[in-house]
């Protein structure tokens, strides 16, 4: 059995180092010592488990000293990252431990921080593609940010887009996004609407322009939403995210509940995102509003927000409150659609709080989320 010197003692290689590749030569002892140095450093400085440290150590040049790695860790700490966040980054991109802080890390991180990214958000951006830190500042990062600013107008919008898609800056934004922006302008989409669409759905504008154009065409031809409508770009989001087979399946659900084609199109023109709801949620909503409450399809189609609200958290509790108040003749001429459209604080103030003394059981049931007992 191979005898090696470990921590100054000649003996058998410890079990947790046997997975480290060995060079069976006169340099084997030095190789193991360097590997141990790296593993030991990761365990003590960032809280790696031995197994994590061994795995990570195979992806980075053996550390000959702590100086550069300490500088990297200290730099991240000064930037507001905690030990866990730093560990996450190093796990994904171990080579950062050998990166020059002044030449590589500082300029890049400062660009991100200047935009407003810090803490966990900065970690998420780096973690989405850690190599972004080491890519060319002047050849990639700054041109990408400058292009986003030219389209989105403000740093706040740029940050919002990055938050939506942490990997955004790892793409060749200028090359991929520019033809798609030109396509939207060709379709008569205003800059304001383009900005809003990119902030909410940046990934769609990194696809091939032909793919995006197919989605634009489908919005007009299938959903019958005119491009000048405020809902047109929401329709693009729907068409870009749903396969034709999935869309047809959802259309069929509505038709099984007695909806006409025009009913479905009315709903889509008013609120396209209803088509992104899960089939289970659509069925649950239609069953309640049409089968239990007796609403007509045309009524629900013209008030599609009814389908968007949470059945358990909003629709059912508020419907129960409304029903009891009507039975007690404490209110009249208030319809469910109006009531569920109120924000929570206003609903509570107008409908629940007055019950505290007059209907304490209803009040307690609502605040304790036990409306099923009413």
Image: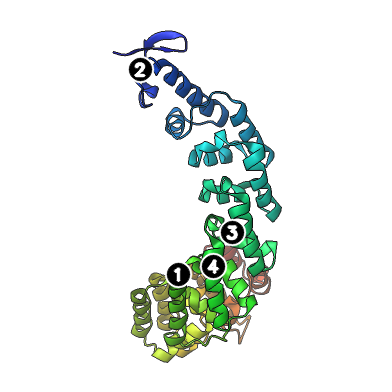
Residue 162 tag number? 3
Tag in front: 3 or 2: 2
The first of marks 4 and 3 along the sequence is 3
Tag in front: 1 or 2: 2
Q: Residues within 10 Å of mark 1 (few under 14, many from 20)?
A: few
In the image, residue 175 above or below residue 214? above
Which residue in the protein does label 2 denote?
25
Give 337 or 304, whichever is nearer the viewer. Answer: 304
Question: Residue 280 falls in which quadrant of the image?
Answer: bottom left
Residue at mark 4 to residue at mark 2: CA–CA distance: 53 Å
The first of marks 1 and 2 along the sequence is 2
Q: Position of residue 166 (x, y in %)?
A: 55, 55
* For the residues bearing labels 4 and 3, Cβ distance under 8 angstroms: no
Residue at mark 4 to residue at mark 3: CA–CA distance: 14 Å
Tag in front: 3 or 1: 1
In the image, residue 318 above or below residue 24? below
Residue 208 tag number? 1
Q: Residue furthest front?
A: 139
SS at badge 1: loop
């Amino acid at each position: 059995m191979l005898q090696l010197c470990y921590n100054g003692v000649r003996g058998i290689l410890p079990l947790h180092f046997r997975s480290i590749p060995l060079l069976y030569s006169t340099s084997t002892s030095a190789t193991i010592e360097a590997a141990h140095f790296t593993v030991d450093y990761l365990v003590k400085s960032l809280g790696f488990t031995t197994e994590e440290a061994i795995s990570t150590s195979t992806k980075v040049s053996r550390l000959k000293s702590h100086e550069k790695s300490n500088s990297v860790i200290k730099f991240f700490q000064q930037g507001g990252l905690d030990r866990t966040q730093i560990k996450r980054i190093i796990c994904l991109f171990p080579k950062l431990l050998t990166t020059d802080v002044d030449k590589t890390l500082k300029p890049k991180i400062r660009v991100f921080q200047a935009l407003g990214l810090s803490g966990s958000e900065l970690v998420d951006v780096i973690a989405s593609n850690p190599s972004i830190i080491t890519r060319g500042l002047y050849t990639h990062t700054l041109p990408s940010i400058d292009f986003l600013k030219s389209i989105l107008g403000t740093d706040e919008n740029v940050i919002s887009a990055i938050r939506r898609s942490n990997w955004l800056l790892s793409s060749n934004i200028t090359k991929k996004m520019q033809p798609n922006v030109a396509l939207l302008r060709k379709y008569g989409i205003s800059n304001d609407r383009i900005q809003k669409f990119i902030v909410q759905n940046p990934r769609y504008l990194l696809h091939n322009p032909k793919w995006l154009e197919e989605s634009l065409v489908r919005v007009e031809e299938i959903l019958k939403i005119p491009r000048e409508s405020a809902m047109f770009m929401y329709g693009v989001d729907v068409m870009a995210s749903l396969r034709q087979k999935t869309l047809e399946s959802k259309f069929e659900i509505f038709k099984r509940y007695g909806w006409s084609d025009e009913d479905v199109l009315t709903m889509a023109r008013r609120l396209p995102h209803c088509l992104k709801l899960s089939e289970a949620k659509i069925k649950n909503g239609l069953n309640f509003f049409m089968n239990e409450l007796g609403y007509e399809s045309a009524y629900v189609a013209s008030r599609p927000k009814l389908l968007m609200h949470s059945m358990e958290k909003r629709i059912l509790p508020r419907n129960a409150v409304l029903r009891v108040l009507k039975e007690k003749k404490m209110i009249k001429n208030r319809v469910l659609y109006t009531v569920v459209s109120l924000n929570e604080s206003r609903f509570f103030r107008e409908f629940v709080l007055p019950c505290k003394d007059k209907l304490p059981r209803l009040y307690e049931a609502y605040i304790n989320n036990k409306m099923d007992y009413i």
